C-alpha cells in the first residue's frame, strides 16, 4: 500500500504530509471560530459567524481538489467493483444508529437535565444563521443530511483516510482519521450541551469516532463513497429529527 508514495519526490512527500496535518486540524479550528470565537450573546443574525462558516467549508472541501491540481496525482485506495454487501452493511449500521438516537432521545433524554439548556443553545445558533423558522430549518436539514454528509465522506474517507491508508496500515489509518473527524464534534457538543463536557460531549464524540471508523472500514472494503454516505446520511437524519423536537416539540 505504500508503493504509490514512491511516485513523489522527497519534497513532495513533505508537502503532502504538511497538507495532511492541515487537513486533519483545520475543521476543528474552523468549528472553534464560528461556534465559539465569533459567537455572540444577542441571539440574532451574526454575519461574521456566517462568513466564517461558509468560508471554512469552502476551504475545507476545496482543499483536496487544490492538492490534486497542484500534484497531478494523489495516492488513494483502488476503486473496486460494485459491492452490494457494503451497501447493505451501510444501510444496516445507519439504521441502527438512527434507531438508537431516536430511542435514547424519546425514551429518556427528552426533557432531562442533560438537555435542559440545549433548546436555547440551538435556538441561538439557528438565529445567528437565519435558520430559526420551521421552513428554513427543513432547508438546512436537507442540505446537511444530503449534501454536507456526502462532502464529509469525500473529505474524511476519500481524502484523509485515503491518504493515510497509503502511509500506514489499515487500523492506524482508521483510528487517526476517525479521531480527527470526531475532533470538531467535541466543540459542537460542548456548545449544545453546556456543563456536560465530560459526561456527554466527550462520550458522544467517542461514539462519533466509532461511527467514523465504521465508515472508513466500509470505504476500505468497497472503495466506494456510497455505503458510508448512506450510513452517515441516516445518522444525520436522527440529529435533525431530535433538533426539530427540541425546537418545536412533536408532542
Image (cartoon, rainbow, N blue to C red):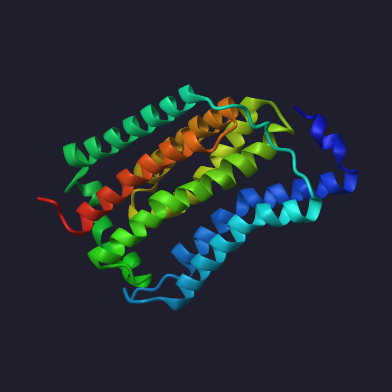
Task: Tell whether 71 sits left or right of 58.
Answer: right
Task: Tell whether 69 sits left or right of 106.
Answer: right
Pick the residue in front: 225 or 173: 225
Q: Position of residue 59 (x, y in %)?
A: 61, 62
In the rendered image, the quadrant that contains the N terminus is: top right
- Residue found at x 69% / y 37%: 76
Pick the residue in front: 189 or 158: 158
Which residue is outermost to the top?
85
Q: Is residue 222 above or below residue 59?
A: above
Q: Position of residue 56 (x, y in %)?
A: 56, 63
- Residue found at x 43% / y 25%: 89
- Residue found at x 36% / y 40%: 234
Q: Position of residue 4 (x, y in %)?
A: 80, 34
Q: Is residue 173 above or below residue 248?
A: above
Which residue is outermost to the left?
251
Pick the residue in front: 197 or 167: 167
Which residue is outermost to the front?
82
Q: Quadrant of residue 208?
A: top left
Q: Quadrant of residue 174?
A: top right
Give the tally of numbered discs. Answer: 0
For residue 180, say whether it is visible: no
Task: Tell whether 83 sits left or right of 248.
Answer: right
Task: Tell whether 239 sits left or right of 157.
Answer: left
For residue 128, say whether it is visible: yes
Q: Position of residue 151 (x, y in %)?
A: 52, 50
- Residue found at x 49% / y 65%: 53
Amino acid at each position: 500500500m505504500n508503493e504509490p508514495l514512491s511516485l513523489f519526490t522527497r519534497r513532495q512527500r513533505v508537502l503532502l504530509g504538511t497538507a495532511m496535518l492541515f487537513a486533519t486540524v483545520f475543521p476543528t479550528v474552523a468549528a472553534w471560530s464560528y461556534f465559539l470565537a465569533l459567537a455572540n450573546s444577542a441571539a440574532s443574525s451574526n454575519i461574521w459567524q456566517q462568513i466564517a462558516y461558509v468560508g471554512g467549508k469552502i476551504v475545507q472541501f476545496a482543499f483536496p481538489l487544490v492538492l490534486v491540481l497542484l500534484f497531478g496525482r494523489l495516492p488513494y485506495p483502488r476503486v473496486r467493483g460494485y459491492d452490494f454487501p457494503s451497501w447493505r452493511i451501510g444501510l444496516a449500521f445507519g439504521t441502527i444508529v438512527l434507531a438508537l438516537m431516536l430511542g435514547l432521545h424519546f425514551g429518556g433524554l427528552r426533557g432531562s437535565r442533560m438537555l435542559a439548556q440545549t433548546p436555547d443553545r440551538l435556538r441561538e445558533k439557528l438565529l445567528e444563521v437565519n435558520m430559526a423558522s420551521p421552513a428554513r430549518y427543513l432547508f438546512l436539514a436537507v442540505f446537511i443530511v444530503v449534501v454536507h454528509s456526502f462532502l464529509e465522506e469525500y473529505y474524511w474517507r476519500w481524502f484523509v483516510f485515503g491518504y493515510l491508508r497509503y502511509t500506514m496500515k489499515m487500523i492506524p489509518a482508521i483510528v487517526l482519521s476517525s479521531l480527527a473527524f470526531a475532533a470538531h464534534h467535541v466543540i459542537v457538543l460542548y456548545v449544545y450541551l453546556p456543563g456536560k463536557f465530560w459526561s456527554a460531549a466527550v462520550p458522544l464524540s467517542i461514539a462519533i469516532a466509532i461511527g467514523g471508523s465504521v465508515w472508513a472500514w466500509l470505504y476500505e472494503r468497497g472503495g466506494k463513497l456510497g455505503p458510508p454516505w448512506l450510513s452517515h446520511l441516516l445518522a444525520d437524519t436522527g440529529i435533525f429529527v431530535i433538533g426539530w423536537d427540541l425546537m418545536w416539540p412533536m408532542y
